[in-house]
Image (cartoon, rainbow, N blue to C red):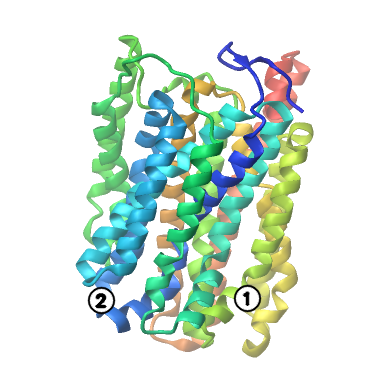
């Protein structure tokens, strides 16, 4: 158990007796926000039948949420640092519940898209408060355990979205089932809101006036928008049509870096303190690892859905159940990893990435060789193996990436980390789906080849993340040989 003592900012730390109950409530809220990234995809036919949405509007119901989510992460994290994470959490959760109700009750496709954009902003504002509150409430080994539960939440919410969506549609019916995809958030969110108000402690005041880097918000928001917009529009030719936004995003990103350095020279709090990348052990490599891993990890779910539902004729529920073993394995190993991350450090992510790559590679081979009628069954062991590896990646990487971040920057650091993951997820979803369709073409006999090439690409991205983890592990061993115990502890 953590004992009173100084934190990374040199301030005293006294464990809050309600911290584990508070964590449970915040993770439930975070689970809802991340679940809504993927759960809606299985309800798209229901929306088209029940509301008459066009293909373009359907795409924005899914992609608009992810876009708004990514745009809100860093500014919301900085606001949590400045004005208190409890306040930001309650505001964001209230907005998420209201927008979920509005989306469920939307009478027209346009209002549904608007509600989803607002819901995405609220979810994006909610997400960095989770990692920031863990930094606030926990220290040492307890922090690793808390991040273990956080990592399990991220992994499970991504993997079980199609399953939960399929169950809701099966119970509520095709015509109006899509509305209950949103309505289910309302009672859960209200309970979480009441409990959060009682259990989350207020953040100590950092002064009456807090400087917010508005120019940085606009520059970073423009850069993220320029990168994500072509990717979320990829299904309708967005990359070919909006390719010019990529150099615009690079230019805005460069100007953002210049501006943030200027803010530091003027001794004003920047939106993202660039010293996180240069002076904070493990942050830059951990953020890079997370981005690359999410390219492969997030992109596989839509490929699986296309293969099983479009290719093999599975129902949404059957398709979701086929990938359930990954979620089960991830849930188990993420919690376990949180308990032992202080002991094994970066070695956990190395082992996890190797296991994910092995599980996905075996799954790829099986789907390209076994008869179609047994495909969903024979991949159970390999998907379980991949899930066990996945649980050893996300939560330990978050712990190792944020462990040296000062508490005063925890929200913006967590927001920046998750922004990278969202960009990676958008790239992976667009790229792997595009590869699948490119190989498939108009010939259904190419289905096996399409899933094989798409999943093989995901395996390659996981191996790239593995190379980053191995490089950091070796850096830690060099630190040991050079007698730098603090650096060695970070990279161990």
Comes first in the chain, label 1 or label 2: 2
Residue 235 in the image, given as x and y percentages of width and height: 33, 68
**Residue 53: mark in rendering:** 2
> Residue 322 shows which numbered tag?
1
Observer able to see residue 288: yes
Compared across the picture, whether 280 is left or right of 237 comes to right
The image quadrant that residue 442 belongs to is: bottom left
Q: Is residue 384 above or below residue 213?
A: below
Residue drawn at x 57%, y 36% as measured from the top left: 286
Which sits in the foreground, 141 or 319?
A: 141
Q: Residue at x 51, y 49 (%)?
A: 192
Q: From this viewpoint, is residue 467 visible?
A: no
- Image point (64%, 34%), residue name: 18
In the rendered view, would you say 444 is above or below 353? Answer: below
Residue found at x 46% / y 60%:
187
Contact check, label 1 and label 2, Cβ < 8 Å: no
Crowdedness near tag 2: few (<14), some (14–19) or many (≥20) residues, C-alpha within 10 Å: many
């Amino acid at each position: 158990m953590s004992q009173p003592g100084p934190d990374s900012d040199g301030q005293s730390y006294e464990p809050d007796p309600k911290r584990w109950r508070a964590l449970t409530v915040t993770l439930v809220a975070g689970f809802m926000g991340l679940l809504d990234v993927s759960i809606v995809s299985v309800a798209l036919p229901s929306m088209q039948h029940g509301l008459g949405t066009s293909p373009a509007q359907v795409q924005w119901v899914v992609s608009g949420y992810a876009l708004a989510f990514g745009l809100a992460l860093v500014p919301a994290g900085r606001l949590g640092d400045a004005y208190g994470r409890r306040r930001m959490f309650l505001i964001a959760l209230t907005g998420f519940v209201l927008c979920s109700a509005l989306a469920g009750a939307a009478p027209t496709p346009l209002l549904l898209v608007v509600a989803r954009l607002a819901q995405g902003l609220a979810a994006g504002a909610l997400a960095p408060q989770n990692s920031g509150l863990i930094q606030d409430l926990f220290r040492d080994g307890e922090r690793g355990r808390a991040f273990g539960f956080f990592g399990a939440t991220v992994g499970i919410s991504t993997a079980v979205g199609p399953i939960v969506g399929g169950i809701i549609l099966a119970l509520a019916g095709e015509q109006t089932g899509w509305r209950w995809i949103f309505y289910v958030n309302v009672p859960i969110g209200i309970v979480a809101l009441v409990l959060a108000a009682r259990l989350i402690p207020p953040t100590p005041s950092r002064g009456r006036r807090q400087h917010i880097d508005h120019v940085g918000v606009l520059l970073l928001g423009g850069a993220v928008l320029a990168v994500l917009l072509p990717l979320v529009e990829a299904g309708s030719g967005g990359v070919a049509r909006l390719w010019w936004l990529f150099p615009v995003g690079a230019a805005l990103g460069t100007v953002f870096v210049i501006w943030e350095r200027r803010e530091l020279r003027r001794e004003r709090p920047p939106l993202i303190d660039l010293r996180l990348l240069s002076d904070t052990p493990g942050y830059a490599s951990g953020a890079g690892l997370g981005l690359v891993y999410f390219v492969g990890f997030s992109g596989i779910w839509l490929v699986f859905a296309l293969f099983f539902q479009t290719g093999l004729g599975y129902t949404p529920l059957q398709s979701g159940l086929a990938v359930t073993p990954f979620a089960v394995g991830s849930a188990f190993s993420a919690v376990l990893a949180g308990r032992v991350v202080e002991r094994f450090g970066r070695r956990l992510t190395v082992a996890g990435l190797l296991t994910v790559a092995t599980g996905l590679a075996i799954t790829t081979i099986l789907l390209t060789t076994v008869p179609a009628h047994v495909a969903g069954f024979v991949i159970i062991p390999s998907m379980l193996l991949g899930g066990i590896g996945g649980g050893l990646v996300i939560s330990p990487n978050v712990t190792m990436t944020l462990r040296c971040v000062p508490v005063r920057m925890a929200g913006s650091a967590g927001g920046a980390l998750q922004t990278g993951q969202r960009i990676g997820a958008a790239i992976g979803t667009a790229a792997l789906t595009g590869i699948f369709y490119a190989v498939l073409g108009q010939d259904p006999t190419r289905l096996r080849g399409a899933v094989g090439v798409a999943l093989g690409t995901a395996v390659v991205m996981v191996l790239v993340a593995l190379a980053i983890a191995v490089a950091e592990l070796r850096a830690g061993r060099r630190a040991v040989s050079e007698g730098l115990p603090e650096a060695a502890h970070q990279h161990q």
